[in-house]
Amino acid sequence: MSQTVFEPWNDPTAKPLIQFKNVTKRFGDFTAIDNQTFDIYEKEFFALLGPSGCGKTTMMRMLAGFEAPTEGTILLAGQDIAPIPPNKRAVNMMFQSYALFPHLSVWENIAFGLKRDKKSKDEIAARVAEMLKLTRLEKFAKRKPHQISGGQRQRVALARSLAKAPKLLLLDEPLGALDAKLRQDTQFELMDIQESTGTTFVIVTHDQEEAMTVASRVAVMDDGKIVQADTPARIYEMPNSVYVADFIGEVTILSGTARRGDGAYEISFAEDQPTLFAESDTEFDNGQECHLAIRPEKVSITAQKPSDRRNALEGKILDIAYLGNLSTYHVELPGGQIVKAQTANTTRLSRRSFTWEDRVWLSWTDTAGVLLKG
Amino acid sequence: MRRLTWFNVTSLSLGFAFLYLPMLILITYSFNSSKLVTVWAGFSTKWYGELLQNEAFLDAAWVTVQVAVVSSSIATVLGTMAALVLVRAGRFPGRTLFSGMVYAPLVMPEVITGLSLLLLFIGIGLDRGIFTIILAHTTFSMCFVSVVVSSRLVTFDESLEEAALDLGCSSFQAFRLVTLPIVAPAVISGWLLAFTLSLDDLVIASFTAGPSSTTLPIKIWSAVRLGVSPEINALSTIMIAIVAVGVITASLVTKRASLRQQADERAAVHA
Ligand SMILES: Nc1ncnc2c1ncn2[C@@H]1O[C@H](COP(=O)(O)OP(=O)(O)OP(=O)(O)O)[C@@H](O)[C@H]1O
Ligand SMILES: [Mg+2]
């Protein structure tokens, strides 16, 4: 069975569903979205990731029609959406604050949008029942929003936005209040829904793992700008900046100067520390400032200096974070920098080889790290 | 420790006496069997009976009720609309002026309001009667409704309306299906407030009433000028009862319902 890769952003003939063209949004003289141009394609699962206040909700609200761009245009299926009011857009939004109707029951909340569509009673009842089942809220259909728990409310909000099966669904932190198990189930449920309905999702999340699991592309935002928008794997393995590398997952950043060597760059990051070697597609001048980003799982930790690797540093274990299946060691170099190394815990706790204050060697290959400009 | 000291008890009694002694006397003497207001001659409800025979009073009462119901209903619609604009429309040119003007009748001396309305009605050649009283009462009670409703709207989470729009409502549907049911307690208490204000208004009514349309307060006022009769006492007692019931209902409705609604809303909106 052949599977075509879903990468419409690499296909020059693909027509984007949403196009942001030089979109700027200001509140007074505060710039919330700063001159952004990007595309979202049909059937994508586009995740917005970024620190609080970076403009994720603002982006969503412009798509839903509650805010108009100060400058620039947003196209939905090739059509400028500025003149279309929110109730005429084939877009539904799940609010970060849920915004459930307090005077209506769970059932009526979910049915609210369907009733506006003048659907028949039976159709509405069937669809609501389907949504209740999906979000496991059957038992709470008759309750009012204040009579259910936070996680249940979140599911009502999700069900309400899903009910109309819109072309574009905006989910502002849809799963934050759910426990790990239910969250995972719902994530897979969302992916299923997406597969079966072909809905395009834009989802805001603070949970990187969630973004990594569900998204076709992840957009990492900072201060009103998308710093990088790419597949989860590329965001993780090939961040385009220290900001992205640092924001997604754990990373050690060693800053120094680069010098062109044979095949790899030579990096000196501290006096009386050995030179490091890293291959890079990005060009660096001799003596140019550079940052080497290395993921902890790519760093090996050994008692003796390894003979097969050029990148080897000696240090002292400062801290051990035990995560069950993994342990992360925080190793302090003589110069004070901390390097993180991760190992899988394949043996039992009592037989683990390293402990606090141990002197150890850290090593990695030339291709393990990413060399970044800033 | 808080205690009821001698001083506290005295001030409390003085305060209450000041507020309620006059009414207490009025109510007591309405049950007096003597025709002389100041002489107690035993308990009787005959004045209430006689009141029911008094056509003039009954007519006035009917006018008053009609005016109160109609004017408070119109005032509620207009006042709610004004509150919506003031709270929701954000900044628009002339907003400050508009809000100032909506609330002006709150502080305007009633005599001025009454006089200016009278001049207006004469100016446009409107015959004074029940219709002009209704207009006048709508004018001054609308701002009270507006104050009550807008204080509720300020705490209303706008994302609820946005959610309604998002799900396909027009702005008017969003108001009717979401906003109005949630702020209903404030609207109802606004209506009750307007109703009681209209019920006991004397000044504005006397400026705008015509010969054929006397309200109860005007009737009482003119009757008292010929001397206080036990019949008037009985009538006033009834009015006190109606107003008291109105005010108590209003405050109960507002307190209970809006407390509960707000708790609902908080719970629904904030996780
Ligand atoms: N109506 C508004 N008026 C003024 N400033 C606003 C308004 N709405 C948002 N902002 C500002 O715009 C910036 C982006 O807000 P936004 O709600 O998009 O953040 P966010 O990325 O969703 O954050 P969070 O993760 O905390 O939800 C914030 O600094 C916020 O203070
Ligand atoms: Mg947000």
Image (spheres, rainbow, N blue to C red):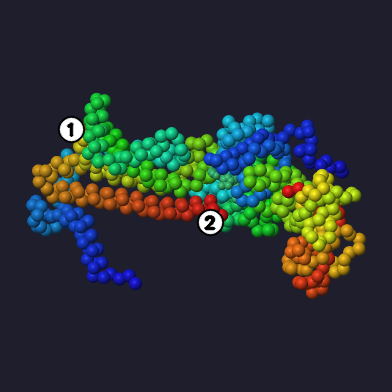
Of B192 and A316, the residue lying toward us: A316
Residue type (three-letter) at the residue carrying disc 2? Gln
- A112 vs B86, nearest the viewer: B86
In this rendering, the answer to whether A367 lies above or below B219 is: below
Q: What's the residue at 16%, 50% (across, down)?
A: B233
- Give the Cα separation between the discs numbered 1 and 2: 58 Å
Q: Which residue is depicted at the point 77% across and 54% down? A: A256
Identify the image quadrant of the N terminus of chain A. top right
> What's the amino acid at mark 1?
Pro
Q: Which mark is residue A147?
A: 2
- Mark 1 on the same chain as mark 2: no
The answer to whether residue A372 is visible is no
- Whether A314 is drawn above or below B189: the answer is below
Give A272 or B266, whichever is nearer the viewer: A272
Residue B222 horizontal side relative to residue A39, left or right: left
How far from the left and from the top, in percent, is residue A77? 68, 32
Q: Residues within 10 Å of mark 2 (few under 14, many from 20)?
A: some
Q: Is residue A200 left or right of residue B75?
A: right
Q: Could you tell me which residue is drawn at 67 percent across and 46 percent down? A: A221
Residue A233 percent coordinates (x, y): 78, 49
Q: Is residue A310 left or right of residue B216?
A: right
* Residue B211 circle label: 1
Viewer-proximal residue among B249 and A6 = A6
The answer to whether marks 1 and 2 mark residues whose Cβ atoms lie closer than 8 Å is no
Q: Residue at x 84, y 53 (%)?
A: A266
Label 2's element? Answer: helix
Is any atom of residue B42 visible in this view? yes
User: How many tags in the picture?
Assistant: 2
Q: Residue A192: where, in percent of width, then height?
A: 72, 47
Judge from the rendering whether residue A207 lies leftward or rightward of residue A290; answer left or right. Answer: left
When the figure is inspected, residue A58 is found, relative to residue B24, above or below; the finding is above
Image position, residue A347 (x, y; %):
82, 69
